[in-house]
Amino acid sequence: MTTGRFITVEGIDGAGKSSHLAYLAQAMRARGAEVVVTREPGGTPLGERLRELVLHEAMETVTEALVMFAARREHVVRVIEPALARGAWVLSDRFSDATFAYQCGGRGQDRRAFAALESVVHPGRQPDATFLFDLDPAVAASRQRAQQRTPDRFEREDEAYFRRVREAYLERARADPGRFRVIDASGSLEDVRGRLAAAFEAFAA
């Protein structure tokens, strides 16, 4: 049986990470793995309902973090752990690093409280690899504007907020270099895809 692996993609809004999920899933399937593609917040019926609330309803910042972790607990228990136990590879669009970046970095939430919630919600479980799409927030904002869609309440935050989020992501990556693969997300989709492909092959070799 294939050994289960847990892979996540992260990055600020507009960095383009979601554009590469299908590629990563196919690269994993090419290695003979069952692949479960999922996302946060979301991934379960309850998680998707909580996603709608957290993306579109105003709430206090501690409440926001708690909603994220509530959705994550359901996700871990009902999707991630069962899939890994049967040998599947799980590919998640965001996980706990996003909460560290957006709520601790962006909102200024207490890092000790974050660590405590991690230890309760997914004790001992971190991704085997995290591909962090890193991009200047000004460039990311320009990409977002070009999409011409209604932004959610995170996407409406200003550039200073996303600079804090980006730095928190890079802080997290520096703290765990064995897990993180930082992908330069500037340039064309093809340029970024090439960098991602090289990083994935190095991880999966």
Image (cartoon, rainbow, N blue to C red):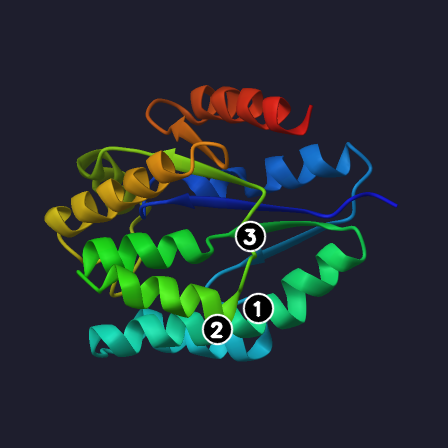
Disc 2 element:
helix
Q: Residue 200: where, in percent of width, then height?
A: 59, 28
**Which residue in the structure is indicated by mark 1?**
75
189 versus 45 height, above or below: above
> Between 176 and 159, which is closer to the camera in this rendering?
176
Which quadrant of the rendered structure holds the C terminus?
A: top right
Asked whether residue 95 appears in the rendered view, the answer is yes
Q: Amino acid at mark 2?
A: Ala
Q: Is residue 83 above or below residue 45?
A: above
Q: Are marks 2 and 1 in contact (CB under 8 Å)?
A: yes
Q: Is residue 113 depicted above or below 166 in this figure?
A: below
| Tags 3 and 1 touching, CB below 8 Å | yes
The residue lying at 19 percent from left, 61 percent from top is 107
Disc 2 to disc 1, C-alpha distance: 6 Å
Mark 3 and mark 1: Cα distance apart in space: 10 Å
Which amino acid is tagged 3? Ser
The answer, for residue 151, to whether it is visible in the render is no
Task: Give the mark, 3 or 1, whose residue is nearer the N terminus.
Answer: 1
Left or right, residue 6 beside residue 70: right
| Mark sitting earlier along the chain (2/3) | 2
Q: Residue 170: x percent and y percent?
A: 30, 37
Place of residue 185 in the rendered image (x, y in percent of width and height, measured from the top left): 37, 29
Residue 71 circle label: 2
To which quarter of the image does residue 112 belong? bottom left
> Circle 1 sits in a helix, a strand or a loop, which is it?
helix
Q: Which mark is residue 92?
A: 3
Q: CA distance from mark 2 to mark 3?
A: 13 Å
